[in-house]
Image: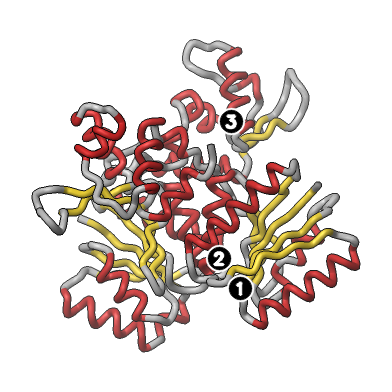
Amino acid sequence: MVSIMGTLGFRPDTILPTIRSTEGLQRVVVFHSDHVRSREAVSEVRDICEQMGLKFSHHEVPDAFNFMRVSKAIQNEIAAMRAAGDALQVFNVAGGTRIMSACALLVCTLEGVNCVYVHDDTLEEIPLPMLQIRYSDVLTPVQRDILRYLLEHRGEDITQKGLGLAFGLHKATVNHHIKELTARGAVHLMPSPKDSRIKLIKVEDSMELLLGRS
Amino acid sequence: MRALICTFGFDADKIILAMKCIKHDHLVLVTGTDNLEHDSFDRISSLCQRLRTPFEVMTTDKFDVLASMSVFQDLVGRLRSEGFVVCMDIGGGVHTLSLAALLAALNLGVETWHIDRDPVRLPVLSGVSISSRLSSEQRALLLQIGPGARMDGLRLPGNRRDAVMRVLLELKRSGMVRVESALPDASVSLTEEGVVCRQNMMRGVPKADGFTG
């Protein structure tokens, strides 16, 4: 099924150029906030899709300013669409809150989905130069495992020694990987509140998005 | 030395929050020309003077994503060549400006934050730029593909045609080049993505960040 996705704010105008320009379009999916004007915009787009015989679905994001919630909603929908064998042609990032657009752009870069935006005044649809970042090629399997472990145990105090025990790695090997992950900004070290000589390894919640693809 | 680039609209509080959250020695605001006349701009300018923080402003057509992306890429390139480690906050200004900043950050591997209600560090790996992900052979071919380039005119060290074909196929698969006519006299051109990648290569490897993936 040929599909498009988009973030939608108060103006249906921002997604209509993509509905017009996508050949063989069969399905439209939009992400929007719970604002009443955003819901009105969704209704208008739904009506248009129904008239055109297009399948329409929408995801209301309860907190459109929550980076992780919006990003995960988009990432999960893309994964579900791919699992169903649908062809996602393009993601329109022109509408919605700034954080919704930024989340969509970021997830699309990580997932290798083309993006367009629509100029505010001219309503011209403009493709964005999207170069897929294959972070999975940059991080080694051990580094990905470490990131995953840190995310799964993010409430706990994890040290390099603890990681070494968990993975059965020598402390020098752990130190090497942590140095690399720190240089890339994927993790950071902070002194333990109990003993400042001990450094705890902390990971940003948003790094979970890097591990979204297998 | 760290330079902080912030997208700026009318909200000085967001910039001040970014200044508190992200360590920096130099501040650059990127904004539309009309935003400079706003009181909040004077507030930041005056605060930076009092803090003795070197401060500069770049203006752009904030509704043009591609033009703004180019402004950000040039700015990051210039700051890195001056020895700065660059970080970015994309939480201010209109959302086209934020998108442009994020695209530039992804392409160049810049530490990126979204500072609004809460500070969020975005999952952009520092120093991992698009061009640093290419092999030396891919870089060599990308640099040869200009207007009217033909497949049989492309060369790689050792002059092996099978290597040229293999690398060209890799670039085509990654969406950077298109082959426009049939063999043997096929013409080859860069896609938008290829052009962006080549521009990034021409800017060189980041010096200050010292890490190229």
Q: Residue furthest bottom?
A: B39
Q: Is residue A23 visible?
A: yes
Is A22 on the left or on the right of B176, as rendered? right
Q: Residues within 10 Å of mark 3 (few under 14, many from 20)?
A: many
Identify residue for label 2: A100
- Please state the horizontal and vertical placement of residue A167, each as a whole percent of the image: 31, 31
Give the amino acid at mark 1: Ser
Identify residue for label 3: B171
Picture layout, residue B149 above or below residue B39: above
Chain hosting mark 3: B
Q: Residues within 10 Å of mark 2 (few under 14, many from 20)?
A: many
Identify residue for label 1: A33
- Please state the horizontal and vertical placement of residue A77, each as a whole percent of the image: 64, 53
Q: CA distance from mark 1 to mark 3?
A: 38 Å
Is A208 on the left or on the right of A48, as rendered? left
Tag 1 secondary structure: strand
- Please state the horizontal and vertical placement of residue B130, each as a whole percent of the image: 46, 41
- Circles 1 and 3 in contact, beta carbons < 8 Å: no
Residue A138, label in figure: none
Chain hosting mark 2: A
The residue lying at 30 percent from left, 50 percent from top is: B80
Q: Are marks 3 and 2 on the same chain?
A: no
Q: CA distance from mark 3 to mark 2?
A: 31 Å
Give the amino acid at mark 2: Met
Q: Residues within 10 Å of mark 1 (few under 14, many from 20)?
A: many
- Circles 1 and 2 in contact, beta carbons < 8 Å: yes
Give the amino acid at mark 3: Leu
Q: Are marks 1 and 2 on the same chain?
A: yes
